[in-house]
Amino acid sequence: MGKHDVVVFEPYPFREGEKIHISDGPRKGDWEVASATDRSVRLRCPVSLREFEWDRFCYVVREEKNVQWPQTQ
């Protein structure tokens, strides 16, 4: 048993009202956290205001300050 470099992932602790940006994948884009439980998160699109609920899936990568949200592309 030797020592190795290990990547550790921790679930993100979503907070209601939080503005988030998912950088890749099928949920890519800007979202607002409508609600969150230990098992699921409900996200709201800031443009259409539609809401979607999914099992928790996000992990912290970085936090950015003073950025445009929602982004215009």
Image (cartoon, grey):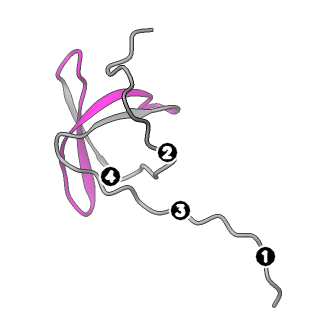
**Residue shown at 65% from the left, 64% from the top:** 7
Q: Position of residue 55 (x, y in %)?
A: 32, 52
- Distance from the alpha carbon under mark 4 to that under mark 2: 21 Å
Q: Does dot 4 land on a helix, a strand or a loop?
A: strand
54 or 33: nearer the viewer: 33
Query: Where does label 1 land, which residue?
Result: 4
Asked if labels 1 and 3 touch by Cβ distance under 8 angstroms, the answer is no
The amino acid type, in three-letter code, at marker 4 is: Asp
Residue placed furthest toward the right: 2
The answer to which image quadrant residue 42 occupies is top left
User: Of circles 3 and 4, which is in front?
Assistant: 3
Asked if labels 4 and 3 touch by Cβ distance under 8 angstroms, the answer is no
Query: Where does label 2 land, which residue?
Result: 62
Query: Of label 4 and label 2, which has the lower sequence position?
Result: 4
Query: Of label 3 and label 4, which has the lower sequence position?
Result: 3
Query: Of label 4 and label 1, which has the lower sequence position?
Result: 1
Residue 31 drawn in magenta? yes
- Distance from the alpha carbon under mark 3 to that under mark 4: 16 Å
- Estimate how packed mark 3 is, as few (under 14), some (14 to 19) or many (20 or more) residues with alpha carbons within 10 Å: few
Asked if labels 2 and 1 touch by Cβ distance under 8 angstroms, the answer is no
